[in-house]
Image (tube, grey):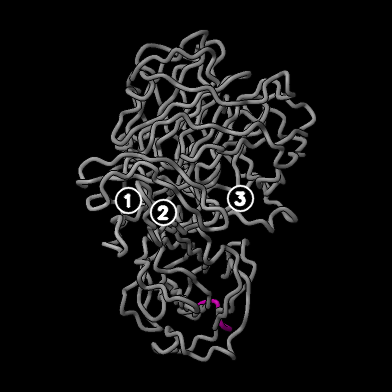
Amino acid sequence: MDMFGKNSSVFRALPIILFFILALPRISLAAPTFAKALTNGIINIPLLTEASGIVASRNNPGVLWTENDSGNAAVVYAIDTQGRNLGTYALPANTDNEDIGIGPGPVTNVSYLYVTDIGDNNSVRANIKIYQAPEPAVYFWQTNNSISNRALKGMRTITLTYPDGAHNAEAEFTDPITGDWFVLTKSNNIARIYTATKTELDTTTNIALTFVCTLNFDVANGADISPLGNEILVRQENFAQIFLRTNGQSISSVFSEPSNGIPVTGVAGGEPNGEAIGFDYYGGGYFTVSDSISSGIQPLRYFAHTSFDGPTPPSVIVAPASTWKYLDNGSDQGSAWRNSGFNDALWSNGVAQFGYGDGDEQTTNSYGSDANNKYLTTYFRKTFVATNVNRIANAILKLVVADGANIFLNGTLISNVNLNSGASYNTLATPMPVSLRDTWQSFTVNPKLLLEGTNTLAAEVHLASATSNSLSFDLQFIATEAPFITSITRFTNQAKITLVGSSNSPTTIQATTNFQNWTSLGNVRLTNGSGTFIDAAVLDFNSRFYQAYRAVP
């Protein structure tokens, strides 16, 4: 399988459909293009005057992370994509926090923040730091009640030492494919690149960096890698480059190949000392901000993919902070409550996050009258409508829970976390580690369990002890849809291919005669979820097969 996600369908050029598959074809290496800057919103945060890095949350829709560099408070800011403040989260230190990233970490289904204390203008530091923590759940209600200096649970300080003496650096990223971390030094004309492997990052907090290669790039002061791992951005104040990565290609090999220029606003456009650059959560474009805004008021700029090689965002079937039915009276509900036909009319209604004890709940659940003998199980149900389920290629469940839960889709168990799959109402969960009590955990779900039309999610959340201090529950359900060839109409030496798929998704068409060698014919955008493509050079209909695919995050 290729390392970059793709959804595809394959058809033979005959009046009948031969078969349908989901595959992972190669990503095209045509140079991507991006629109000029669009002001997505205005950042107005008086203390955010030197934003030196930016990264999009992979789990909190519409949330970005940024930080000030040296001389400012040791915090990281959560903002939304309109620039509104969602709160600050405390860091161990800020010698010179120059960039921020997101990537894999010690727990495989958890996304981690990497705040990187790597600046060293005089090249005198004995070592540099990464402040790594599971990314916390963040909500839009925080715009009206922003969090201040909240602790990041599970914070680790990782100390790193260069093999050849001190360097100044302002650019870094974590490879989403391998989990390895890379730092690019900042100097005139050239950047030196060093790495720490995922194994090192997961198992120790003192790491000797390994030199990787050099890159001919002048004064690198920001970088990011796409969620798919197939594009890398490197910028300085007035220009930026994009580097393309093929399947299985190493980072050192990527940086040995030519790059392509991409737009940034620069000083002339009103972005002085622009250092921060970061993809959006699915790789459909990138954000930039300035490092030198004394007022804390500046545009949040966004550059959208305009070429057909960009990915399409997944569909949100159940959003975080959704409304659910719940029952928190300590009763034994047996098993009927899991099924679609169950009557939950007498259950309460509330908005997630649910629970008690953490202070981030929107709906506070009851634990009974005795704090030393709390109800062990709280039940939740939600119905939702899914359409075109035959075209859904994969589905992902994201869960915030403490302590444990069993999750059911239309009566079928799809995930169990810290809890026996056959748990009864009084079964104790395994305690959720403190480091994971405030973060999204992701689980793959078989999309064939989805029904066309109305579906039901049901969750039972269990405590690890009748004296537990807190309960938490929220859930997201997202899906990615494959482009689907619905028909092929034959003309003389031509074929019209009709497709459906996610609205406005860029889709690539390929053809083959032997399933060994695929030829890219071109691209089509599925405006409003449908489109057509003309293959104008058909010589033999009897042995011609077509494949439609698009990148998925």
Using the image, determine if residue 304 lies above or below residue 188: below
Prevailing secondary structure class for the magenta stretch in the rendered image: loop
* Disc nearer the start of the sequence (1/3): 3
Q: CA distance from mark 1 to mark 3?
A: 36 Å
- Residue identified by numbered label 3: 62
In the drawing, what numbered circle is on residue 497? Answer: 2
Judging from the image, what secondary structure is the residue with disc 2 in?
strand
Q: Is residue 107 visible?
A: no
Picture quadrant where residue 54 is located: top right
Quadrant of the rendered image containing residue 72: top right
Which label belongs to residue 21? Answer: none
**Kind of residue indicated by mark 1:** Tyr
Residue farthest front in this picture: 492
Image coordinates of residue 444 in percent, x first then y, are: 36, 61
Q: Nearer the viewer, residue 371 or 206?
A: 206
Q: Position of residue 528 (x, y in %)?
A: 57, 57
Kindly report the distance in space between the C-alpha atoms of the residues bearing marks 1 and 2: 9 Å
Residue wearing tag 1: 546
